[in-house]
Image (tube, grey):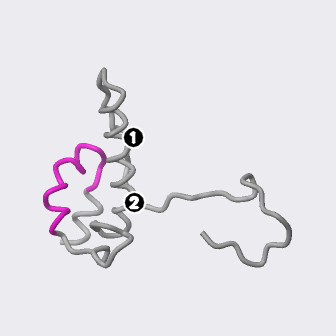
C-alpha cells in the first residue's frame, strides 16, 4: 500500500482496507469440521477465491497469470461452485 499526500503520522485507524471481488454470493457457504486447522484451510481457500475472482477467474493476481486464462479455473470450478454462486463469473466468460 502507498499513502501519498497525507500530512502527519498515519495511525492504523486512519486506513480502511476494502476487498474487491466479483459480485458472487458466499452466503450459502457452510463448511465446518471438528478440526480447527481444516476449518482455517477452507477459510483461506474462500479468501483466495475472492481474490482470484475479479471479473474473470485468474490464477495468481500478483503474477502475469492474472490475465484470465481458464486452465486453473477448470480444475477449481467444482470447489468454486460449492463455495459460492459463481454462475455470473463463469457464464459471462463463455
Q: Give the labeled residue for mark 2.
A: 51
Locate residue 36, reporting x and y percent. Answer: 36, 27
Figure quadrant of residue 14 = bottom right
Mark 1, residues whose alpha carbon is within 10 Å: few (<14), some, or many (≥20)?
Answer: few
Question: Can you say whether 18 is above or below 83 in the image?
Answer: below
Locate residue 17, reporting x and y percent. Answer: 60, 58
**Tag of residue 76:** none
Q: Residue at x 31, y 25 (%)?
A: 35
Locate residue 40, reporting x and y percent. Answer: 37, 36
Q: Relative to residue 39, is residue 10 drawn left or right?
A: right
| Residues rendered magenta in the picture | 71-86
Q: Residue at x 15, y 68 (%)?
A: 71
**Tag of residue 27:** 1
SS at mark 2 in the image: helix
Quadrant for the N terminus in the image: bottom right
As for residue 81 lying within the magenta part, the answer is yes
Q: Residue furthest top?
A: 34
Locate residue 51, reporting x and y percent. Answer: 39, 60
Q: Are marks 1 and 2 in contact (CB under 8 Å)?
A: no
Residue nearest the observer in this picture, 35 or 50: 35
Cα–Cα gap, marks 1 and 2: 17 Å
Question: Can you say whether 22 is above or below 27 in the image?
Answer: below
As for residue 15 lying within the magenta part, the answer is no
SS at mark 1 in the image: loop
Amino acid at each position: 500500500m502507498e499513502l501519498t499526500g497525507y500530512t502527519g503520522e498515519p495511525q492504523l485507524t486512519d486506513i480502511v482496507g476494502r476487498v474487491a471481488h466479483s459480485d458472487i454470493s458466499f452466503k450459502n457457504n457452510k463448511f465446518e469440521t471438528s478440526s480447527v486447522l481444516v476449518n482455517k484451510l477452507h477459510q483461506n481457500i474462500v479468501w483466495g477465491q475472492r481474490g482470484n475472482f475479479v471479473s474473470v477467474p485468474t490464477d495468481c493476481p500478483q503474477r502475469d497469470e492474472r490475465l484470465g486464462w481458464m486452465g486453473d479455473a477448470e480444475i477449481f470450478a467444482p470447489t468454486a461452485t460449492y463455495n459460492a454462486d459463481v454462475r455470473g463469473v463463469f457464464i459471462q466468460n463463455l
